[in-house]
Image: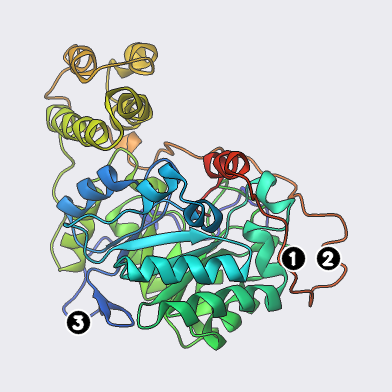
C-alpha cells in the first residue's frame, strides 16, 4: 500500500458519539493519572511554555515541552535551559529529551528530576536528515541494544519519575523498528511507548497507519500512546476504539487551535464538543498568546515567533489570505491586532480548516543513515552527536519531536 492511500477509515465513516461512562480509563504513568488520556505532542518551536499554558487552560491532560538536547542542557545553553524550565502552574511538568549518549542522557535526567520534573519523554522518532545521517533520532531504534542502553540510563536516573519513549514505525516500510522498540521499552522499565504511525521516510505525508498502533498494543503490556492524524476530538475516540491504545498524542491538529483540548475533554467526559470559536474569539486568544510569548522571550523574539501563529490561527478565514504577507512581517502586538481588525469578527470557523495541515512539510524522503550503519545492528556504540555550543544550537533549530 502506498503512503498516499488511506490506511484507516475516513472520519465520515466513523460514528461521532462521545465516550460512554467507563469506556476509557485514565492514562497511568507511574504515580501520574492523566485524564482525559490526551498528550500534547512535543513540537520544536511550538510547545514552549506560552502555548502549553494556553492548551492547559482549555483542557486537562499531559503537556510535553518541545524537545531539548542532553548536551545543550548539560552545557548550560541559555535557550535550552529556558525551554526546560519549570513554572508554578505546570503540574504535571513534562519534558521531552533528546540524546544519543547514555552518559549524557543519564546525567540530564538526574538533573531534571532534581529540578522537579514529573515526567520524561525520550525522542527516538526524529526523521530530520541532519540527525539520522549521524545515527540519531529515528535511526536509533534500528539498533535495539543501543536503544536499550539509552532507555536504561534514563530510567535508572529518573527514580520514581516515569520515563516514556516516542518512536515511529521505522525507517521505511522495508525497515520497521517499532516492534523491537516496544520490547526494549518494556524490558528496560519505560512506563509507556508512543507510536507515530508513519515511517521516517513518510515524514508527515499520507495517512498514519493506525494498524501498527494496534499491533504494538497487542505485543506489549505497558501503555501505548497513539500518534497520527488526530485532527478533531472524534479522531481521538476513533483511534482509541479501533486500536485499543491507552492515550492519544495530539500534534498538528492543535496548531492554531488550542481549544481542541476543551473539545477533547468534553467528548471523553461524555458530552458533545462546543462549536469552534468565531474569529473575534480567536483574535482574543491570539492577543493572549502574543502577550505570553513577549513575556517569555521579549518583544522582538516573541513577536517573531508569533508570526507563524498568525497564519495558523487565521487559516481559511475569509480575507485572511490578503493579510498573510503583512502578518508574516508583523513586529508588534498592536500592529497584529490592527491587521486582524480588518477581518469580520463574526466569521465562523471555516469547516475546511479543521483538517488542514498547518505545519510540517509533506512529501516523502529517502532516509539518510551513516555509511555502514546497517552492517551490525547489535552495535551499541553511541552515534556522533553535537558537542560544541554552536553545533548544539544548529541541531536544536532543526530537530523534530517525531
For marks 1 and 3, the one nearer the N-term is 3
Residue 292 x %, y %: 21, 36
- What residue lies at 16% left-to-right and 14% top-to-bottom? 341
Q: Nearer the viewer, mark 1 or mark 3?
A: 1
> Which residue, given by chain and number where applicable, does mark 2 sit on?
374
Picture quadrant where residue 113 is located = bottom left
Q: Are marks 1 and 2 in contact (CB under 8 Å)?
A: yes
Apparent side of residue 22 relative to residue 75 in the rendered image (left or right): left
Q: Is residue 194 visible?
A: no
Figure quadrant of the N terminus:
bottom right
Residue 233 x %, y %: 28, 56
> Which residue, given by chain and number where applicable, does mark 1 sit on?
175
> Which residue, given by chain and number where applicable, does mark 3 sit on?
22
Q: Are marks 3 and 2 in contact (CB under 8 Å)?
A: no
Apparent side of residue 88 relative to residue 168 in the rendered image (left or right): left
For marks 3 and 2, the one nearer the N-term is 3
Amino acid at each position: 500500500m502506498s503512503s498516499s492511500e488511506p490506511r484507516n477509515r475516513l472520519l465520515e465513516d466513523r460514528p461521532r458519539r462521545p465516550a460512554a461512562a467507563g469506556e476509557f480509563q485514565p492514562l497511568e504513568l507511574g504515580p501520574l493519572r492523566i485524564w482525559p488520556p490526551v498528550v500534547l505532542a512535543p513540537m520544536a518551536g511550538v510547545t514552549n511554555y506560552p502555548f502549553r499554558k494556553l492548551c492547559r487552560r482549555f483542557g486537562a491532560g499531559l503537556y510535553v515541552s518541545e524537545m531539548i538536547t542532553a548536551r545543550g542542557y548539560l552545557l548550560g545553553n541559555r535557550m535550552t535551559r529556558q525551554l526546560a524550565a519549570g513554572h508554578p502552574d505546570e503540574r504535571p511538568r513534562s519534558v521531552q529529551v533528546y540524546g544519543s549518549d547514555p552518559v549524557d542522557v543519564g546525567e540530564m535526567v538526574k538533573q531534571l528530576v532534581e529540578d522537579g520534573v514529573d515526567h520524561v519523554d525520550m525522542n527516538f522518532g526524529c526523521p530530520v536528515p541532519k540527525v539520522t545521517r549521524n545515527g540519531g533520532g529515528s535511526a536509533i531504534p534500528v539498533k535495539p541494544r543501543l536503544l536499550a542502553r539509552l532507555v536504561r540510563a534514563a530510567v535508572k536516573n529518573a527514580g520514581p519519575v516515569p520515563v516514556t519513549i516516542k518512536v515511529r514505525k521505522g525507517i521505511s516500510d522495508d525497515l520497521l523498528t517499532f516492534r523491537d522498540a516496544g520490547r526494549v521499552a518494556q524490558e528496560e522499565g519505560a512506563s509507556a511507548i508512543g507510536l507515530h504511525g508513519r515511517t521516517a521516510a513518510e515524514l508527515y505525508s499520507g495517512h498514519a497507519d493506525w494498524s501498527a498502533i494496534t499491533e504494538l498494543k497487542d505485543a506489549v503490556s505497558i501503555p501505548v500512546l497513539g500518534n497520527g492524524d488526530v485532527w478533531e476530538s472524534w479522531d481521538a475516540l476513533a483511534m482509541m476504539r479501533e486500536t485499543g491504545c491507552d492515550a492519544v498524542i495530539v500534534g498538528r491538529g492543535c496548531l492554531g487551535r488550542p481549544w481542541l483540548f476543551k473539545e477533547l475533554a468534553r467528548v471523553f467526559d461524555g458530552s458533545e464538543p462546543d462549536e469552534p470559536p468565531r474569529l473575534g474569539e480567536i483574535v482574543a486568544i491570539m492577543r493572549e498568546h502574543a502577550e505570553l510569548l513577549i513575556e517569555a522571550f521579549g518583544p522582538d523574539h516573541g513577536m517573531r515567533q508569533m508570526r507563524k501563529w498568525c497564519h495558523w490561527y487565521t487559516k481559511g478565514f475569509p480575507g485572511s489570505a490578503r493579510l498573510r504577507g503583512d502578518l508574516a512581517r508583523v513586529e508588534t502586538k498592536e500592529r497584529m491586532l490592527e491587521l486582524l481588525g480588518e477581518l469580520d469578527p463574526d466569521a465562523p470557523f471555516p469547516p475546511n480548516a479543521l483538517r488542514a495541515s498547518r505545519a510540517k512539510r509533506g512529501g516523502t524522503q529517502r532516509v539518510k543513515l551513516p555509511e555502514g550503519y546497517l552492517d551490525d545492528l547489535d552495535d551499541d556504540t553511541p552515534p556522533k552527536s553535537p558537542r560544541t555550543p554552536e553545533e548544539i544550537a544548529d541541531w536544536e533549530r532543526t530537530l523534530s519531536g517525531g
